[in-house]
Image (spheres, rainbow, N blue to C red):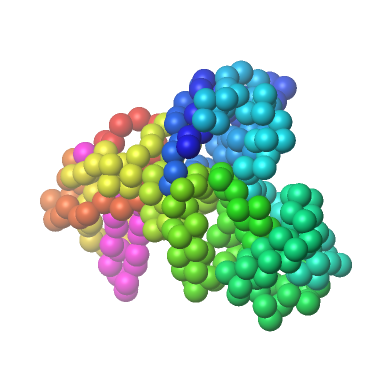
Amino acid sequence: MYLEIKKLEKVYKDKIAVKDFNIKLEAGIYGLLGANGAGKTTLMRILTGLIESTKGFVLYNGVDINKMGNQYCKNIGYLPQDFGYYPEFTVDDFLMYIAAVKGLDHTDARKRVNEVIDIFTLAEKKNKKIKTLSGGMKRRVGIAQAILNNPKILILDEPTTGLDPKERIKFRNFLSKFSDDKIVLLSTHIVSDVESIANKILIMKNGKLIDHGTSEELLERIEGCVWECNFNKKMADSFQMKYLVSNLKTVGEIATCRVVSKNKPTEEAFEIKANLEDLYTYYFNKDGEVE
Ligand SMILES: Nc1ncnc2c1ncn2[C@@H]1O[C@H](COP(=O)(O)OP(=O)(O)OP(=O)(O)O)[C@@H](O)[C@H]1O
């Protein structure tokens, strides 16, 4: 099973939201990382079949998704960023309703809704109106509705927003079981989520796919270029103007900085292991090469 994205482009009036995007996705979890406005939602909406691209193709097992119609939709589960829930519905009624929209008959719907209520520990809330739930709980309902039809392709736009750390772990464990023979694409601003959840990471900037790979592969790009240095906190501002700082911590008078730089930034600086936050800083705060 694969989803191949070929020379994809989406233009809104005069704004190019997705540009010359090429990749082949196979079973696994892909984390889509990018700043606000990078084009993540637009890309995801094209992949769900909700909007059409201006140029290029998306092929599902070699067939253009625009030519597959409903046959393609059956394979899709989608959690939009602004998940439009029905405030007056109870959790159970809402899930039963979505299951019907997805074409499940009543018996299958009941069985499947019970399963997802169990997976996302929603039993206690199932008779509560959605409008009374917390943000994290609504997000759980949103993820639950996306998997009702047991989709082959699951697209989740910022699924972890509002989830507390315990819920994040549950979600991660669920996805690793769920994604065995499925394509899961999730977008997030939370770098640590991608690091722990995704097998592969796609980095998107200004509509383009600028890099992709496992986190180990991506971290090789900045190997030997991440440093820790300590100095007086009064120098923090000028230091940040000069260097790409991925983290700054101050204790008393001492500032401790993580710096991404090809050259040793200070005499006392020492090399440390790169993480995805450093890579994110490298890609999103500077256009060029590591200094
Ligand atoms: N319907 C639209 N009409 C015009 N421009 C749009 C439309 N939708 C998105 N855009 C623009 O396209 C670009 C990409 O937007 P998109 O929402 O895909 O990015 P994103 O990476 O999902 O951002 P965020 O993380 O903030 O959700 C942005 O500049 C946005 O303003």
The quarter of the picture where residue 286 lies is: top left
The C terminus lies in quadrant? top left
Please report the residue visible at 71 percent of the width from the left and 77 percent of the height from the top.
Answer: 125
The answer to whether residue 202 is above or below residue 253 is above
The segment highlighted magenta reads 245-262
Instruction: Kindly give the residue lying farthest to the left in the view shown.
Output: 267
The answer to whether residue 147 is above or below residue 13 is below
Whether residue 5 can be seen here: no
Whether residue 104 can be seen here: yes
Q: Position of residue 262 (x, y in %)?
A: 21, 39
Residue 184 magenta-drawn?
Answer: no
Q: Position of residue 58 (x, y in %)?
A: 57, 27
Residue 259 magenta-drawn?
Answer: yes
Which of 272/98 is in front?
98
243 horizontally vs 78: left or right: left
Please report the residue visible at 24 percent of the width from the left and 49 percent of the height from the top.
Answer: 226
The quarter of the picture where residue 95 lies is: bottom right
Please report the residue visible at 61 percent of the width from the left and 73 percent of the height from the top.
Answer: 118
Please report the residue visible at 43 percent of the width from the left and 47 percent of the height from the top.
Answer: 28
